[in-house]
Amino acid sequence: MFAKPIPGRMTAGAEGDVVVLLIGMRINHFRGIHHWLPVLAAMPRMLRELTKDKSRGLLGYTLLTGSPRTYYVVQYWESKEKLYAYAAAPDMFHRKAWAIVNRKEKKSRQHVGLWHESYIVPEGGYESIYADMPAYGLAAATEALPVRARGRRAADRLAHRSSGG
């Protein structure tokens, strides 16, 4: 049920650019459950759809709560092109869910807020360290490596390039 910690210090084994998508919702009025519950339920469905087909580009994700009102997901993607392709694909659930949200927006706006932020992080623009943790975040989305594989200092890990430079 609970992941075992990996002893020692680890880092993420990501290679190349990484796209980080933060996406979430805020329940503005708990009484409007019929407005926000479908929005809350849509994300797990999209994540299941994406994890079934790795070619869509989702590397991994972490579900988080900020408070009883806020829920969000940190997603790691192979590329912005794959993220955009999923968002626009007519055969995927995101397109249907977004159409429903847009139709109901005027009625739902006061009950539920939606947001997202996307970051394209070039290789050499990210580093990580996980001490006595299960694989988490970018390391869970890619692989957990012993920190010595990328450098003991943050500056060394930031300087890592998959080409060896």
Image: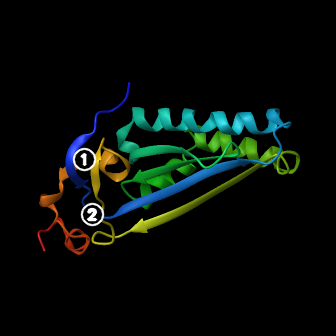
The disc label shown at residue 127, or none: none
Tag 1 secondary structure: loop
Tag 2 secondary structure: loop
Q: Is residue 107 above or below residue 160?
A: above
Percent position (x, y) of residue 120?
43, 67
Q: Is residue 4 left or right of residue 87?
A: left
Seen at 46% across and 44% down, the residue is: 62
Q: Is residue 77 left or right of residue 87?
A: left
- If you read the primary sequence from the N terminus, does the residue marked by circle 2 or circle 1 appear first? 2
Percent position (x, y) of residue 123?
29, 69
Using a 10 Å C-alpha cutoff, classify the residue at mark 1 as few (fewer than 14 neighbours), some (14 to 19) or many (20 or more).
some
Residue with the mark numbered 1: 143
Judge by depth and name the residue closer to the eye, 62 or 80: 62
Alpha carbon separation for disc pair 2 and 1? 13 Å
Q: How many numbered discs?
A: 2
Q: Is residue 79 left or right of residue 149?
A: right
Q: Is residue 14 visible?
A: yes
Seen at 50% across and 56% down, the residue is: 21
Looking at the picture, which amino acid does disc 1 mark? Glu
Using a 10 Å C-alpha cutoff, classify the residue at mark 2 as few (fewer than 14 neighbours), some (14 to 19) or many (20 or more).
some
For the rendered model, the colour scheme is rainbow
Percent position (x, y) of residue 54?
36, 40
Would you identify the image quadrant in which residue 115 lies?
Answer: bottom right
Seen at 67% across and 40% down, the residue is: 97
The quarter of the rendered structure image containing the C terminus is bottom left
Q: Is residue 12 visible?
A: no
Looking at the picture, which amino acid does disc 2 mark? Gly
Residue located farthest toward the right when viewing the structure as drawn: 107
Q: Is residue 72 above or below residue 46?
A: below
Q: Is residue 105 left or right of residue 92?
A: right
Residue with the mark numbered 2: 16
> Which tag is nearer the camera, tag 2 or tag 1?
1
